[in-house]
Amino acid sequence: MRLSNELCHRARSLVADRLGLDFPEARRADLEQGLLRGLRASSLAAPEAYLAWLGALPDGSPEWGRLAGHLTVGETYFFRDRATFEALEQHVLPTLIAIRRAEGVLRLRLWSAGCATGEEPYSLAILLHRLLLDHPDWVLTILATDINPEVLETARRGRYRPWSFRETPAWIRDRYFHSRGPDTFELDAGIRRTVTFAPLNLAEDGYPAVVTNTSAMDLVLCRNVLMYFTQGAQRATVARLRRALVPGGWLVVSPAEGSADLLGPLVPATFPGAIFYRKEPAGDQGLGVGDWELGIGDPGTGVRDWGLGAGEWGSVASFPEPQLPAPNPYVSTPLPQPPPCVPQPPTPSPQALLEQARALADQGSLEQARRLCEAALARNRLDPEAHLLLAAICQELGEIPAALDALRRAIYLAPDCAPAHFLLGSLLLRQEEHKRGRRCMETVVSLLRAGPGDEPVPGYDGLTAGRLLEMARAYLDLNREGLGAGG
Ligand SMILES: C[S@@+](CC[C@H](N)C(=O)[O-])C[C@H]1O[C@@H](n2cnc3c(N)ncnc32)[C@H](O)[C@@H]1O
């Protein structure tokens, strides 16, 4: 298909705007070919009509994901780029594991962003399985997202052809896969269950957010995705992924994508044949909380320690000694002095506690965040927002029954709280409760469909009602009736 210059220009800016994808003149033929495939799959006849139809679709429509599939190469394979996986196996993951063991927190959160058909997140799952002999004791999150619902469907099935093992040591296939007929290998169900697949457009700004399980990551792999993006989309995506990392967390891009200019504030770390990027352990904390009078700073997180563990409202850091008035030389008998006034620390409001809890959760200090959330709830048990935040934190802690309980309370108190239905839906879908999960996502759609899309979701930076609506629709598309098991 050959597009007129005017149509080509329109297509280029539409695709850049909605998908972040870059098609300079030198790649015009790729753009035209991808659009032609998209056009053929639609019921429309002419490119003009197809472009107009695309332009009118909401951002999160699965059609955009399918078009991304036509416009990008979904090529991937197990343990792609040996040097990267060696650095992960020999340095980065053992270090993260050792830190967590020393902290007594057996939890790791990894994210494969732009996971295609799943080989990358499953490689991470296999690696963790090999590194953690006590893996049943760990709470492991491996989130795997992609914009294209078709590749996610393939990923969830976990069945692969020999081409997916083109550079994979043979013993990995023998050890972790079961042969299912000629040329088909199915990944072990235990490993499969470790990975959570979800639709997400990296070029949009609905992440990181606890409600979408996209924050407090120890390691993010975003490889062979940014190379397709416009410069603006690359920068915005890297900034969001950086915010999704805990202090000291790692971002891995492919060797061709790494540039100091793009990855900027992250610190490069060189391993044989690979460069990873690390968020400074005490880096930009940007908590946006007020100038608190109470508590002392925690140098590790840069966050005030409210001292809740001790069962008190924090310790007073450095109030000045109370000054007694000087004696009056004209009065022989000293007047009785009022007792010295010791300033009392102001008691933080439940809302302030929640803000702080959210900031801590974003940084991965999940236990502290939970304590603050519970403290806010102890003051006001009827606050649905606090129950919702508690649910999101419990989800990140891997405490799913507690998360479900908190969500039920949030929804009881605020039946039209769309983020609560969204989180409940994503948890149920993760547990393969397809019918109930779908119902929740349908509720999100019916709650948000008529409202203004640009309205921010309170408490979730950058997440708008429109984005949440799109994500719910994408989940519904990914879990279409008849596709899922059980529920
Ligand atoms: C080449 S694959 C990368 C797979 C894997 N990360 C690897 O390196 O082997 C690129 C993937 O990026 C996805 N992608 C393209 N644009 C995207 C976007 N805006 N948001 C999320 N994923 C996107 C594509 O659907 C495709 O599955």
Image (cartoon, rainbow, N blue to C red):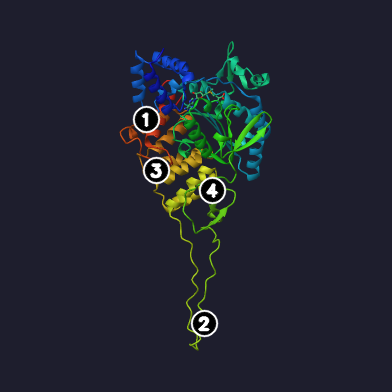
Q: Earlier in the sequence, mark 3 or mark 2?
A: 2
Q: Spot the residue most to the bottom.
A: 332
Q: CA distance from mark 4 to mark 3?
A: 22 Å
Q: CA distance from mark 4 to mark 1?
A: 33 Å
Q: Earlier in the sequence, mark 2 or mark 1?
A: 2
In the picture of the structure, the residue carrying the numbered disc 4 is 368
Give the foreground label among 2 and 4: 2
Mark 3 residue type: Pro
Give the foreground label among 1 and 3: 3
Q: Are marks 3 and 2 in contact (CB under 8 Å)?
A: no
Relative depth, front residue between 156 and 48: 48
Q: Are marks 4 and 3 in contact (CB under 8 Å)?
A: no
Q: Earlier in the sequence, mark 2 or mark 4?
A: 2
For the residue carrying disc 2, how many other residues have a C-alpha within 10 Å: few (<14), some (14-19), or many (20+)?
A: few
In the picture of the structure, the residue carrying the numbered disc 1 is 442
Determine if residue 479 is in view.
Answer: no
Label 4 residue near ligand 1, CB within 8 Å: no
Q: Are marks 2 and 1 in contact (CB under 8 Å)?
A: no
Quadrant of image for the C terminus: top left
Is label 4 in a helix, a strand or a loop? helix
In the picture of the structure, the residue carrying the numbered disc 2 is 327
Q: CA distance from mark 2 to mark 4?
A: 48 Å
